[in-house]
Amino acid sequence: MKNTNVRQRTYYSNRDIRNSDYRYVDIFQYSGYEDEPIRILKTRNGKEKFTAPAKKVMNDKKSRLYFDLLLKGNFGENDYFVSLTYSDKFLPESEEAAEAQIKKYIKDLRKEAKRRGVDNLKYIYVTENGKTRGRVHHHLILQNCLPRDVVEGLWSKQIRPFHPEREMIGWCNAKRIQVTGPDFMIRISKYLSKDPAGRKRWKQSTGLILPGTTKADNVCSVKQFEQMSLFGNTIELEKFVKKHHRGFVILEAEKELNEFTGQWYVRMQLMRKTLWQKTMAICEAREKAKLDKAEELKIPYVPEFKINGIQGVLW
């Protein structure tokens, strides 16, 4: 009979766990490889590696988890969230044509960034079809190293060869990512990986900081695990984090069903405490400024900031 222990599987937003600001932690009873909620591959030398999905399609937990950590480890406040659509005139006839157009746009961005001294422009983009009319469009998370008008203006084509006049391909809106709560990057990740109408896949630049993973066995007793997984005991969860992830706070904690074994396990989203305190301070200062302005103008003010959940605008 196999011996069962309680295993902790940690996924983090940096190859070096000590430098990661975000972590996902799975806690589950383990007796063999088949009990892992997400299957982790081993390299030839026996080391475990959290690899990118082969097709980079957001159709399972591993893909969405990898995408989430990739986003958090490379982008943040003041980077660009860019939405790109097509007018009827330039609407691509196929996914391949849309992919060729976004690649041309990325090439122009990289060329412009290189002129300004940035050799490796960082980006992640997602291509999807709209739910209502099925029109293809793109969302791009882009390193903030170019002026906003340049980012938007390059989504265009020359009207005539060797002439400066250009015509917009469609609508392009570049907004700076703002801190709207401790979960501001989580909310953007969820928005980009929401249930697609058809296939949804992402592409990324080279040189990004890739996520990592590690494991530890016998991290707690079976009784403590049952308190956390079956009864959602928040006190036991906080004790666990304080012992194994000192300096981090819990953003979300929930129990999920292991697709392979049919047993429950605990998943927590953690954020470095210093970063959490910084985002809270930014949000509270912004709310206070809005409240003071409302009092000055003598108009009612309804607070928009909430600590938990998906709320408000994304930026």
Image: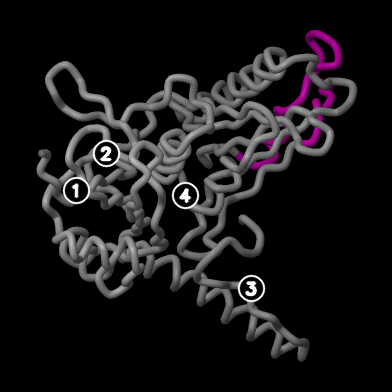
| Residue at figure coordinates x 54%, y 24% from the top left | 110
Q: Element under label 1?
A: strand
Q: Which mark is residue 35?
A: 2
Q: Element under label 3?
A: loop
| Amino acid, disc 4 | Gly
Q: Position of residue 179 (x, y in %)?
A: 52, 61
Residue 213 occupies quadrant: top left
Q: Is 166 part of what is drawn in magenta?
A: yes
Q: Is 287 part of what is drawn in magenta?
A: no
Number of residues whose C-alpha sits closer than 10 Å to that of mark 1, classed few (under 14), some (14–19) or many (20 or more): many
Distance from the alpha carbon under mark 3 to that under mark 4? 21 Å
Q: Which residue is mark 3?
A: 304
Q: Which residue is mark 1?
A: 7
Q: Quadrant of the C terminus?
A: bottom right
| Amino acid, disc 1 | Arg
Q: Quadrant of the N terminus?
A: top left
Q: Which residue is mark 4?
A: 76
Number of residues whose C-alpha sits closer than 10 Å to that of mark 4, classed few (under 14), some (14–19) or many (20 or more): some
Distance from the alpha carbon under mark 2 to that under mark 3? 42 Å
Disc with the residue nearer the chain's start (1 vs 4): 1
Distance from the alpha carbon under mark 2 to that under mark 4? 34 Å
Q: Are marks 2 and 1 in contact (CB under 8 Å)?
A: yes
Disc with the residue nearer the chain's start (2 vs 1): 1
| Amino acid, disc 2 | Asp
Disc with the residue nearer the chain's start (2 vs 3): 2
- Camera-side mark, 3 or 4: 3
Disc with the residue nearer the chain's start (1 vs 3): 1
Q: Are marks 1 and 4 in contact (CB under 8 Å)?
A: no
Question: Which of 297 and 264 lies nearest the eye of the viewer?
Answer: 264
- Specify start and end residues of the magenta stretch as a single range: 147-171
- Camera-side mark, 1 or 4: 1
Distance from the alpha carbon under mark 1 to that under mark 3? 39 Å
